[in-house]
Image (cartoon, rainbow, N blue to C red):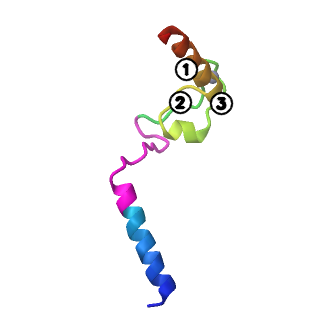
Amino acid sequence: MSAEDQAQQVELREWERNNASRPAPVKYKPGDHGYGPAHCVSCDDDMHPARREHGFDLCVPCKTIAEQAGNQYAR
Ligand SMILES: [Zn+2]
């Protein structure tokens, strides 16, 4: 085994150890229960597939507005 292969194995083991303790990212496939809607529930804009995969139902601008509003009420 070459030094490069050994280094890659060490790297892989470290990666696995670092990632084992973290919860797996929430990912939904199209059709899964929990997959986000095709359109934002607030403004009806198209939803980015990556956001739908995480089960979000608000687009980025609406989510930002909601968070800012939430922060204002929290103060
Ligand atoms: Zn929206």
Give residue 2's mark: none
Query: In the rendered image, which residue does mark 1 sit on?
Result: 67
Magenta-colored span: 17-33
Main SS of the magenta part reads: loop
In this rendering, the count of numbered labels is 3
First in sequence: mark 3 or mark 1?
3
Residue at image position (34%, 56%) is 20
Front of the two marks 2 and 1:
1
Q: Amino acid at mark 3?
A: Asp
Q: Position of residue 49 (x, y in %)?
A: 58, 40
Q: Amino acid at mark 2?
A: Pro
Q: Position of residue 39 (x, y in %)?
A: 60, 27
Q: Is residue 73 above or below residue 14?
A: above
Query: In the rendered image, which residue does mark 3 sit on?
Result: 46
Q: Is residue 18 located in the magenta-colored stretch of the structure?
A: yes
Query: In the rendered image, which residue does mark 2 sit on?
Result: 37
Q: Of residues 22 and 42, which is closer to you in this image?
A: 22
Q: What is the spatial separation of the Cα atoms under label 2 and label 3, in whole angstroms?
A: 9 Å
Q: Is residue 3 left or right of residue 13?
A: right
